[in-house]
Image (cartoon, grey):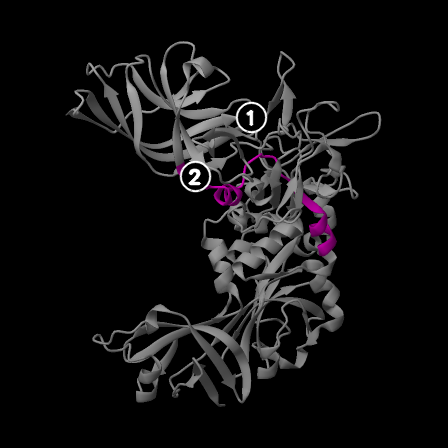
């Protein structure tokens, strides 16, 4: 028997002491976040010149190399058959031998999802209408993107609309694109996954949109407000004006004025009901006064609507410059503004320097550009007062549930009764239905069994599966009474009485009755004792299914119904489990194309078996752990 091993396409030396044992895992009955790739035990390579060259002389303490700290591409051939074609090779340690390990199947990329902290809100998105956001409007009608369900507001409520929803398949595709891990869903579950929808219950603005609407307005000029025009109280008032720019800003609107014959921006407001704005500005002012009286001086944002100084800024430095040639006193006042303000669609603010002492004259010595980074603190149902056009872009990704990506994948695979198998492209999901249906394709390994006993019995027979109890409970979040629980039973009194298999990160939704039939309610809006509409921004995420092209419902989503439909075959198979271990001869070419969804048949017992694991040594005899169907 001849073994050939390549690391980064370079052949390595193998001697009689090098044992390469391949471990194949079906991950049947394994929760998706705990799946493992096919792998080897430690492979001990001899310390030859060629092998030392392949590992870039990492065996020498004086050698500065990255070889042990990165993964390498590996290929393994046995008797001329390339059993493993695209493995990840890791150098583990060096002693008398060079110890490496191999893993294959695209689990390394999937492990980043499993072990990472990325949530659904960390998914990438762009700024394309209907692909990344919807322009929120009452007039769009109901569809899979805006499904009908009861959110708690009255039919004629002008200040609340249907919230958008995204499909579970859409989210899985996003995760796949960002991670590079493909998810292959069996045909029998594709329709269900595509019908699963997540209503977007928050009203978060998009950071991407906020970033793209940052503006930097160059200082243009300053302008004295004349007493006869706007100042009947005798205050000295000076406005800062900024050069025209950013007119098409999604959040902000401007007012203009001619200052010294030049059109400048001098007032700012919001197109939204409310917009948070981070402002940055540095201003140096010179105050001039004959009697060295600089009291009651202020600088801030003036609110024209309320006729008051809305935001006051404190100087970071004040310098008395003494008297000038005309005998007038001068003072330099320096401001460095780095603050958050709130703008509304009713108010227009301007930067104003003012004092009650009309004897004080004010000059702008220097002023840098005004930096504005706007962000709507919530998406409001409101129109631009000037144009009556709605400006509410509802972005999908920022409003996805704040749950980990792996927890979402786990939830969907659990609802579908699916188990994950790593393959070269990513993760392939299979079901017990698929395995049982593949009996017609079963591999007949009857004559390959290496009998351990003269009697007709396996090498090892066990009667339980790891992680199972007598009652295996499936739950929705925040369902203390267990109204929507489901149970899969295992008929074995030696096991623990009950075990919680999974609690979904989604809460169940209430189904109510009306004259026209049942409907699903999510209490996102309500009315207070004064009849005013209130919005609940702290709801647990929900998961529904599209009843048709316009209505989303929780009907059929309780775990009793899910188990009856998605776990029908599974619950029958695990009720009285039997797991056998046998030594079986498996040709190299069969190991290369092994399909874990296809069962095997053993004539000595007249039974079909699903593969749980295979340990393949170079003798050609494999230790197989098999689940009896």
Residue at x 65%, y 30% (from the top left corner):
387
Badge 1 density bin: few <14, some 14–19, many ≥20, Cα 10 Å: many
Image spot of residue 370 (x, y percent): 40, 36
Query: Which of the marked residues, 1 or 2, is nearer the chain's N terminus?
Result: 2
Residue 200 painted magenta: yes
**Residue under label 2:** 217
Image spot of residue 59 (x, y percent): 27, 78
**In terms of secondary structure, where does tag 1 sit?**
loop
The relative height of residue 588 versus residue 267 in the rendered view (above or below) is: below
Image spot of residue 502 (x, y percent): 57, 45
Q: CA distance from mark 1 to mark 2?
A: 20 Å
Quarter assignment of residue 32: bottom right
Q: Is residue 59 left or right of residue 445?
A: left
Residue at x 37%, y 79% (from the top left corner):
44
Q: Nearer the viewer, mark 1 or mark 2?
A: 2
- Front residue of 332/199: it is 332
Badge 2 density bin: few <14, some 14–19, many ≥20, Cα 10 Å: some
Magenta segment boundaries in residue numbering: 190-219
The relative height of residue 275 versus residue 132 in the rendered view (above or below) is: above
- Front residue of 107/94: it is 107
Image spot of residue 311 (x, y percent): 39, 22
Q: Is residue 430 visible?
A: yes
- Front residue of 321/19: it is 321
Q: Is residue 618 visible?
A: no
Q: Quadrant of the C terminus?
A: bottom right
Residue at x 48%, y 59% (from the top left corner):
111
Q: Is residue 289 left or right of residue 607?
A: left
**Residue under label 1:** 345
Q: Find out whether the residues at labels 1 and 2 contact each other: C-beta distance under 8 Å.
A: no
Residue 355 painted magenta: no
Residue at x 61%, y 80% (from the top left corner):
590
């Amino acid at each position: 028997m001849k073994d050939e091993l390549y690391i980064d396409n370079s052949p390595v030396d193998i001697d009689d002491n090098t044992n390469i044992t391949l471990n194949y895992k079906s991950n049947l009955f394994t929760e998706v976040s705990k799946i493992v790739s096919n792998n080897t035990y430690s492979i001990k390579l001899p310390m030859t010149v060629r092998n030392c060259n392949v590992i870039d002389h990492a065996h020498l303490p004086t050698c500065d190399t990255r070889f042990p700290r990165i993964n390498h591409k590996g290929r393994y051939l046995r008797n001329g058959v390339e059993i493993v074609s695209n493995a990840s090779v890791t150098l583990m340690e060096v002693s008398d031998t060079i110890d490496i390990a191999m893993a294959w199947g695209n689990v390394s990329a999937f492990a980043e999802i499993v072990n990472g902290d990325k949530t659904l809100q960390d998914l990438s998105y762009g700024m394309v209408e209907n692909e990344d956001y919807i322009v929120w409007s009452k007039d769009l009608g109901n569809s899979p993107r805006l499904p009908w369900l009861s959110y708690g507001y009255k039919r004629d409520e002008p200040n609340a609309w249907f919230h958008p929803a995204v499909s579970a398949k859409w989210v899985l595709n996003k995760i796949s694109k960002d991670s590079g891990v493909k998810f292959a869903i069996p045909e029998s579950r594709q329709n269900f996954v595509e019908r699963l929808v997540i209503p977007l219950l928050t009203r978060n603005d998009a950071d991407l949109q906020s970033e793209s609407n940052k503006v930097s307005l160059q200082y243009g000029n300053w302008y004295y407000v004349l007493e006869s025009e706007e100042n009947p109280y005798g205050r000295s008032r000076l406005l800062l004006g900024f050069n025209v720019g950013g007119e098409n800003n999604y959040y902000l609107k401007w007012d203009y004025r001619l200052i010294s014959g030049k059109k400048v921006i001098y007032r700012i407001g919001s197109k939204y009901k409310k917009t948070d704005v981070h402002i940055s500005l540095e201003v140096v002012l010179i105050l001039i006064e004959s009697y060295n009286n600089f009291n009651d001086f202020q600088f801030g944002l003036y609110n024209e609507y309320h006729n008051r100084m809305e935001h006051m800024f404190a100087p970071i430095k004040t310098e008395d410059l003494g008297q000038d040639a005309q005998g007038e006193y001068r003072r330099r006042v320096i401001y460095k503004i780095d603050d958050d303000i709130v703008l509304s669609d009713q108010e227009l603010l301007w930067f104003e320097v003012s004092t009650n002492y009309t004897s004080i004259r004010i000059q702008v010595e220097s002023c840098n550009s005004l930096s504005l980074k706007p962000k709507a603190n919530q998406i409001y149902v409101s129109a631009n007062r000037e144009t009556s056009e709605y400006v509410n872009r509802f972005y999908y990704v920022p409003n996805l549930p704040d749950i980990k990506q792996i927890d979402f994948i786990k939830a969907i695979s659990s609802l579908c009764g699916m188990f994950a198998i790593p393959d070269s492209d990513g993760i392939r999901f299979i079901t017990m239905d698929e395995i049982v249906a593949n009996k017609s394709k079963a591999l007949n390994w009857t004559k390959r069994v290496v009998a351990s006993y003269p009697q007709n019995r396996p090498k090892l027979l066990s009667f339980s599966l790891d992680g199972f109890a007598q009652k295996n409970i499936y739950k929705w979040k925040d369902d203390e009474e267990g109204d929507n629980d489901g149970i899969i039973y295992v008929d074995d009194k030696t096991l623990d009485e009950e075990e919680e298999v999974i609690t979904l990160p989604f809460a169940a939704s209430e189904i109510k009755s009306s004259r026209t039939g049942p409907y699903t309610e999510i209490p996102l809006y309500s009315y207070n004792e004064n009849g005013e509409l209130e919005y609940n921004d702290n709801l647990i995420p929900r998961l529904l299914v599209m009843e048709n092209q316009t209505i989303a419902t929780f009907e059929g989503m309780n775990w009793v119904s899910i188990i009856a439909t998605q776990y029908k075959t599974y619950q029958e198979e695990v009720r009285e489990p039997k797991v056998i271990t046998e030594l079986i001869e498996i040709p190299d070419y069969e190991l290369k194309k092994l399909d874990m969804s296809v069962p095997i048949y053993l004539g000595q017992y007249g039974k079909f078996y699903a593969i749980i694991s295979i340990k393949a040594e170079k003798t050609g005899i494999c230790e197989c752990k098999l689940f009896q169907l």
